[in-house]
Amino acid sequence: MPSVFTVASKEFSDIIKSKRFLILVTIFVLLVIVAQGTVYVSVSSSTQRALPRGFLGSIAYSLVTIMSYFAPIVGLALGFDVISGEREKGTLKIVLAQPIYRDMVFNGKFIAAFLSVSLAVLVSSVVNVGIAIVALGISPPPEDVVRLIIFMIFSILFAMTYYAISAFLSTATRRSSQSIIVGVILWAVFVFIIPVIASLVASALVPVSFTPQNITRSNATTFRPPEMQQYTSQMAARAQISSLINSFTPNYHFTSIAHYVLGVYAGAGTIAGGRIPTAPSSSASTSLVMNLFSAWPNILVLTTLTIVLFIASYTLFIRQEIR
């Protein structure tokens, strides 16, 4: 009887040889080249030959931005027809007619997807880092290498979260077209709609009654009138409400993790529907262990969501009647 690893090996071979996988990786590599080319032009046109925040400061923002979009697309593209596609082709019934258990089929597909996602993230990240080294002439120190490796691990987790969403939809629906449509709609809701709703709700619940004018960074730190303090507290309340609403999306948790792993060098920003919190000036010297400890709630959410969706898909698949 074939083992789960035999099924995984066959599925992995089919995935990496498919046009879908090759096109996804190619598109991502092209996006990386464009992003790093933009960084190279900005560095070349400046008076400094290297960015002041080192290697990660040069590539972190573009890497996180692209990965925030690339990882969900890979997960959705690999999972939308994992069950429904074979059901439509009639191959699932033939496979299950062989001396092989259903759990081996499902687990083998999940392992193959994990290996494929890992390969895609590894290739894209290595290309990104390689181009940055050649174009910018900056070699990453050991700590930066460790941070990049950890970031790749969480990028794989992020992609597998979307794969789990897509696989559940593929198991629950009869047609792959339905699965991909619902998956893309969910992705759009997570990336575009919920952040807009969060911003509108925060603005409605906490109206800003004071707008500071003609306040520079130097005098803002030394002089804080009551109006400025009120404005600061109102903006902080808005940020808390917005973060609470955005926390219902996996994208928010990924960008938060990226902030703690890489963003202490790249600064704050809004990436793929999740706002990266502003790092204090001393955060660049914070140890990696402390960064990971701060990110553990976000890591827990992504891990739990992936596991729960996998169990739900597995249970549904085992109980389905295959015709």
Image (cartoon, grey):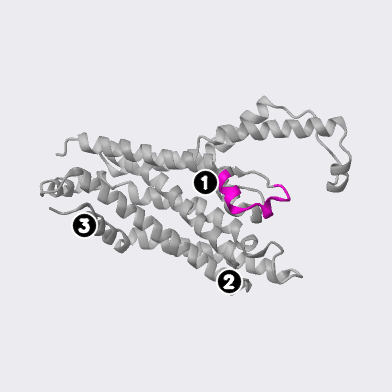
| Residue 244 coordinates in the image, percent (x, y) | 58, 32
Q: Which residue is mark 1?
A: 254
Q: Is residue 190 left or right of residue 202?
A: left
N-term mark: 1 or 2 = 2
* Residue at x 26%, y 35% (from the top left corner): 316
Q: Is residue 8 left or right of residue 241?
A: left
Left/right placement of residue 165 relative to residue 139 reads left
Circle 2 sits on which residue? 133
The Cα–Cα distance between marks 1 and 2, rounded to whole angstroms, is: 25 Å
**Closer to the camera in the image, 308 or 293:** 293
Q: Give the residue at the far top of this rendering.
A: 205
| Residue under label 3 | 6
Q: Name the spot of residue 31 as percent of width and height, x first.
A: 51, 62
Give me the disc on residue 62.
Answer: none
Which numbered disc, 3 or 2, marks the residue that appears first in the sequence?
Answer: 3
Residue in the picture at 45% in, 48% down: 158
Do the numbered discs 1 and 3 sit on residues whose CB atoms are within 8 Å?
A: no
**What secondary structure is the stretch in magenta mostly built from?**
helix
Which portion, as a residue range, is magenta?
280-293
Dot 2 amino acid type: Ile
Q: CA distance from mark 1 to mark 3?
A: 32 Å
Task: Indicate whether residue 282 is drawn in magenta.
Answer: yes
Which quarter of the rendered picture does the C terminus lie within? Answer: top left
Q: Quadrant of residue 35?
A: bottom right
Residue 141 position within the rendered picture, expressed as x and y whole percent measured from the top left: 60, 67
- Which x, y percent locates residue 33? 53, 67
Q: Amino acid at mark 1?
A: Phe
Disc 3 from disc 2: Cα separation: 39 Å
Give the label, 1 or 3, closer to the camera.
Answer: 3
